[in-house]
């Protein structure tokens, strides 16, 4: 329960509504010039936004504390101030001196980047009126307050009122406004849900603080797709974009390690190769552990059940750990077959060939189903030197064989295991037969 103060109806408001109303216009007579985009100078950031920054847009960026939201935005602000116009950066969490220390560390020195440490929304409106910036950055919305309201900063009424004031600045003057938002323990944006409805774009900056890679993804975008993904690397000099994420994510992959399989996942229009790791170990508990990082927990349990029932691998007394290396998160079904082969590889101690990429969805009957945009995925794998692909038989039959990669079509998980571990096929079949006889 959150207390919200209702203001008197006769109280004089700071903004008076105009008595002049615009008349409705036929859609055929409207102009689309407002959708022209400006580059932020960071291609990965532009990719997630849909191609660049739209004039008058309100962009909300959320993420865990210390993940790099402020660093990303001050780098964007610096690029915009040198190429597109004056930028006003307002921080309610840091003093101007603290921002200067960070600016020196990451090499920011533009004279058109104006810094202010302020939390009063009326003062920010006055700054915008006096300075006339081309872009505004607010860090963060939970620290801003409207003096006309008696509640504390960060409450529902304060966040809603301050966001509404920033939306008026963005829409009336055509100034793009970037807003930093805090997140809760569950990972959702703090504050009222209406906050996400009021803005045009909602971005989440994700990643493990102990990993160097950060992922920027959109969950709402009125000016573009929400399927694109931007990958950054955190360095001492700031955030640097990763133009080739597949190569970066596979750079530390072991050559002859068991339980390691590469799959190709689609993030919007971009294929990314990710290493799936699995470790199967004897369990000393009544209920074996099932731990997943970067992959869906329930889907992994389903895959383990298919391996037990359809393939005959005994996993009921084993702890199983599955991980998507590099701190990325995979939500699409194309990684199902890679998870199954990684688990089977760790269980049988037979490694999958280093130059093999695996993709396919697994059904409850143990069948391997086709996935979308297979050609793009295989082209990326071929470009990185992969020589063989294990995929659904239907997909392999439709594709052009001149892609520079050998395609092996399989119809079931058992067939995929036979192909992937040709040298260990007898061992796997013995295990399966022993389990069937004991059952």
Image: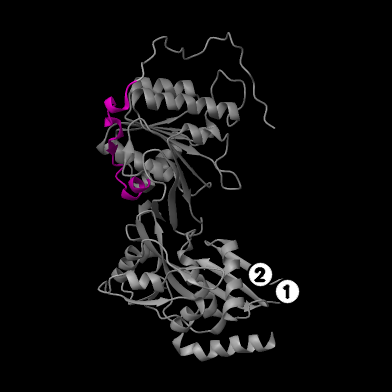
The secondary structure type at the circle numbered 1 is loop
- Residue 21: x %, y % from top left: 39, 13
Question: Which residue is at a point 57% across and 39% down the rendered structure image?
Answer: 190
When the figure is inspected, residue 361 is found, relative to residue 220, above or below; the finding is: below
In the rendered view, does 67 fall on the left or right side of 394?
right
320 w.r.t. 123: above or below: below
Q: To which quarter of the image does residue 354 belong? A: bottom left
**Does the image show residue 110?**
no
Relative side of 382 to 116, left or right: left
Q: Going 43% across and 49% down the picture, which residue do you hit?
A: 217
The residue depicted at 49 percent of the width and 49 percent of the height is 67
Q: Position of residue 156 (x, y in %)?
A: 59, 30
Residue segment shown in magenta: 25-48
Q: Does residue 132 appear in this view?
A: yes
Which residue does the numbered mark 2 point to in the structure image? 289
* Real-space Cα separation, disc 1 to disc 2, in angstroms: 8 Å
Task: Out of 196 and 241, give the one closest to the viewer.
Answer: 196
Residue 314 badge: none
Location of residue 250 in the rendering, given as x and y in whole percent from the top left corner: 40, 69
Whether residue 26 is in magenta: the answer is: yes
Q: Which residue is mark 1?
A: 285
SS of the residue at dot 2? loop
Q: Nearer the viewer, residue 231 or 102?
A: 231
């Amino acid at each position: 329960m959150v207390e919200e103060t209702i203001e008197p109806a006769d109280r004089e408001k700071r903004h008076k509504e105009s008595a002049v109303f615009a008349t409705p216009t036929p859609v055929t007579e409207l102009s689309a010039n407002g959708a022209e985009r400006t580059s932020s100078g960071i291609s990965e950031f532009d990719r997630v936004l849909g191609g660049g920054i739209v004039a008058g847009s309100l962009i909300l960026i959320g993420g865990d504390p210390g993940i790099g939201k402020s660093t990303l935005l001050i780098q964007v602000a610096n690029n915009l101030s040198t190429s597109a116009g004056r930028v006003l950066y307002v921080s309610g969490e840091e003093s101007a001196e603290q921002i200067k220390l960070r600016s020196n560390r990451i090499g920011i020195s533009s004279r058109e980047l104006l810094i202010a440490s302020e939390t009063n929304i009326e003062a920010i409106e006055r700054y915008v009126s006096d300075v006339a910036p081309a872009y505004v950055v607010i860090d963060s919305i939970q620290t801003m307050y409207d003096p006309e309201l008696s509640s504390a900063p960060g409450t529902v009424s304060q966040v809603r009122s301050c966001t509404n004031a920033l939306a008026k600045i963005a829409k009336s003057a055509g100034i793009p406004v970037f807003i930093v938002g805090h997140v809760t323990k569950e990972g959702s944006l703090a504050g009222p849900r209406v906050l996400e409805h009021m803005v045009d774009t909602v971005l989440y900056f994700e990643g493990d603080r102990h990993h160097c890679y950060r992922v920027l993804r959109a969950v709402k975008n009125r000016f573009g797709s929400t399927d694109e993904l931007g990958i950054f690397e955190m360095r001492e000099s700031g955030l640097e974009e990763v133009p080739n994420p597949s190569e970066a994510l596979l750079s530390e992959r072991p050559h002859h390690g068991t339980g390691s399989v590469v799959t190709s996942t689609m993030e919007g229009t971009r294929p990314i190769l990710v290493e799936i790791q699995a470790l199967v170990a004897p369990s000393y508990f009544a209920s074996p552990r099932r731990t997943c990082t970067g992959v869906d927990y329930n889907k992994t349990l389903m895959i383990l059940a298919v391996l037990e029932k359809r393939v005959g691998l005994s996993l009921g007394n084993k702890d199983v750990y599955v991980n998507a290396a590099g701190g990325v998160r995979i939500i699409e079904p194309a990684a199902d077959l890679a998870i199954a082969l990684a688990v089977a590889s760790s269980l049988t101690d037979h490694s999958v060939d280093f130059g093999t990429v695996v993709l396919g969805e697994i059904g409850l009957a143990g069948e391997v189903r086709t996935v979308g945009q297979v050609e793009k995925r295989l082209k990326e794998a071929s470009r990185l030197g992969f020589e063989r692909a294990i995929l659904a038989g239907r997909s392999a039959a439709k594709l052009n064989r001149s892609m520079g990669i050998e395609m092996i079509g399989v119809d079931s998980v058992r067939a995929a295991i036979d192909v992937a571990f040709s040298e260990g096929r007898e061992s796997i079949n013995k295990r399966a037969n022993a389990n069937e006889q004991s059952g």
